[in-house]
Image: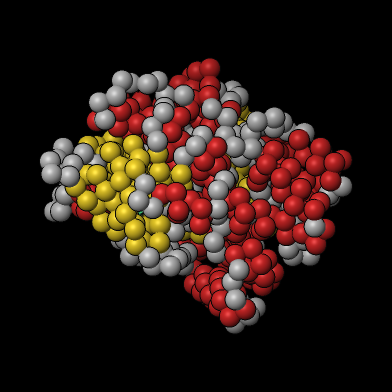
Amino acid sequence: MKSRAETLQQIEGGKFDVCVIGGGATGAGCALDAQLRGLHTVLVEAGDYASATSSSSTKLVHGGVRYLQQAVADLDVGQYRVVQRALHERRLMLDNAPYLAHPLELLVPCYSRKEALYYSVGMKMYDWIAGKGNLFPSKHRSVADSVKRMPMLKPDRLVGTVAYGDGQFDDARYGMALIQSFSDAGGEAVNYARVVQLGKDARGRLNQAEIEDVITHRRFNLQARAFINATGPFSDCIRGMAKPGITPRLRLSKGVHILLPLDKEDTKDAILIPETDDGRVIFAIPWLGRFLVGTTDDEAEHDDEMIVTKKEAEYLLRHLNRYIVSPLRVDQIVSAFAGVRPLVKSKSALDTKKLIRDHEVEMEQQSGLISVLGGKCTTHRAMAEDGVDMTLGYLGKPLIPCCTGHHKLHGAEGYGPEFWRLLVSEFSVTPSTAQHLAEKFGTASLRVLEIAKQDSRYASPIVQGLPYIQAEVVYSVRQEMAMTIEDVLARRIGLQLFSWAASIKAAPVVGSLMSQQLGWSAEETNQEVEQYVQKISRLMTAIGQVPETA
Ligand SMILES: Cc1cc2nc3c(=O)[nH]c(=O)nc-3n(C[C@H](O)[C@H](O)[C@H](O)COP(=O)(O)OP(=O)(O)OC[C@H]3O[C@@H](n4cnc5c(N)ncnc54)[C@H](O)[C@@H]3O)c2cc1C
C-alpha cells in the first residue's frame, strides 16, 4: 500500500466516481466492491482503519443463533432471512481470508433433557438454514465428551452439551485486509482524514467533501460523483451534513468484552451461555491464546467513553463463573474493550436487545447521499454489494455484477494451514512467531520477515518471551499506514488485546521504531509513549486494576 503522505497527495483536489466515508468493515467492503466494479474510488477514515466498532466485536462470523431463536419465537420472517443471509456470508468470509477467519465449535451446556432437545432441534435448524455453507453438523455431546473437550466446564447437574459450528475471526486485521485489497485493486484509502463538510452542485447533489487531516489539521477538498456514508455509529452525523435536520435512523448499544488467561488444556471449544439474568446470551471463546468473554447490550450515546467498567466486567464474570470449575476474578483480566453497535431503529422494538441486526441502504433523494446502515461484520460484503448496486444506479451506470463473493483478500493467496512451517524453514523463526505472523498477516508475513532478514535488529521480540517481533512494527508503518502506537499494538499486531501490561512494556520500543520510520522528534516520541501508557492505565483503573506504572 502507498504511504499516507503519497496518498494524500493523490487525493487532494482529486476527482473520483465514488467517495466512501468511513474505514470500518462496511466502508472498506464498499470501497473494495466499488473499485472492483470499475468505479474510481477513494475512502476516507477519520481515525485508524477499523478503529471503531469493527475492532470491538465478539469476533464471531455468524448467522446468530439468538436471532434464529427470536425469529422462531416471534414467527418473524424478516429475522429468519437475516440469519439465512448471514450464514451465506459466513462461508464467503471464511473462504476469502482463511488466515483470519476459521470454523469454531461452540458448546451450549444443557441441564435437563428438555433443554438438550430444545437446543438440539434449534441447532439442526441452524445447520439446515446454512445449507451447503454449513461448517459441520451440530450434535449432542455427552457429559464426559463435553468435559474432555472443555476441562474447565463444571460437570455438576450437566446432562450434556449441544455442539454447533460458527466462524471466528480477527476483526481488526480483517478490516486491514479489506483496505489492502482495495489498495491492490487501485483504490485510494487514507486514515486520520475526517469529512467535515459536504458540498453540493447547483441541483443540490453532493459533489465535494471537505476533509481535515486529523494529524496536521490541514483542510483540503476532493470531488466525487457519488458519496457512500459508511460511518457506522456516526452515520446520522453524515446524514445531517447532507440534509440538515434529517430524522436520525440509528440507536446505539454498548457492548463490552474482557480477556482472560487461557491454558491450552482449559478448552478447545467456546461456550454459549444461552440465558443471562437479563435475557441475553454470552459467549466465552478461545481467541488468539486468550479467553474472550462478552458481551453486554446497553443503550449508549455518541459521546460515551468506550471503557469497560468494573461493574460490566463483574456482570460477565458472574455469568461465566456459574459454568466453570475455577471461578475467574476481575484481577485476572488481562485486557478488555468496548464498542457501540449501530442498530437501525425500529418502531416496534423498544429494547436494543430486540432490534434486528439487519442492514438498510438508504438514498437521501435531494443530495443523493447513500447511507449503508446497521448490519454486522459478518454481512459487511452483502451490505457493500447492496450499497454499490444503488450507487451504480445513481450514477446511471449499467449494473456491473459484484465480484467480491469469491475475491481472495490480501494475504490469502497461496495460504494454507501449514503455511507457518515455511516461515520457520525459510527464515528460522520460532514456531510461535511463525504461527503468530501467519495468523495476522497471512502470506504477507513473508514481507514482514524480509524486513527482519535485511536488518537483523528487527528480528528481535518487541517484549521478551512473546512472539511479536519488531519487523511487524516497521511493516505496519511502511505498508499499513499505522500512525500511532495504539494503531500498531491494538489493531496491526493485537498485543494490546493479549495483555495490557505487556503493551505498556512494549510502548517505548514501538515508539522508538515508529519514530525512525515516521521521523518523530524525541519530544514527539516521548509524548506519544506517555499518552499511550496513560490511556492503558486509565482502562486498567476503570476495571479496578492498578497499573504497574501508576
Ligand atoms: C459489542 C459488539 C459485538 C459485536 N459482535 C459481532 C460479531 O461477533 N460478529 C459480527 O459479525 N458483528 C458483530 N458486531 C457488529 C459489528 O462489529 C458492526 O456491525 C460493524 O463493525 C460495523 O462496521 P461499520 O464499518 O459499519 O462501523 P465502524 O466500524 O464503526 O466504522 C465506521 C467508521 O467511520 C468513521 N467515521 C465516522 N465519522 C467520520 C467522518 N466524518 N469522516 C470519515 N470517517 C468517519 C469512524 O472513525 C469509523 O472508523 C458487534 C458489535 C459490537 C458493538
Answer with the quarter of the image where residue 170 lies: top right
Front in this rendered view, residue 186 or 179? 186
Residue 38: which quarter of the image? top left
Colouring rule applied to residues: secondary structure
Residue at the top extreme, as displayed? 132
* Residue 231 percent across, percent down from the top left: 35, 49
Q: Give the quadrant of the C terminus.
A: bottom right
Determine whether, in the image, residue 289 is placed left or right of residue 363: right
Q: Nearer the viewer, residue 441 or 297?
A: 441
- Relative image position of residue 10 (x, y in whole percent): 44, 49
Point 53% across, 75% down: residue: 531
Percent of width and height locating residue 515: 63, 69
* Residue nearer the viewer, 356 or 492: 492
Residue 278 showing in the rendered view: no
In the rendered image, is residue 223 in sight? Answer: yes
Residue at the (15%, 53%) spot, across then down: 244
Q: Please give the name of the residue rendered at 42% of the width and 24% of the height, measured from the top-left corner.
A: 402
Is 19 situated left or right of 313 in this image? Answer: left
Is residue 372 shown left or right of residue 36? left
In this rendering, is residue 458 above or below 147?
below
Say which residue appears at 40% left-offset and 43% top-offset: 42
Number of numbered discs present? 0
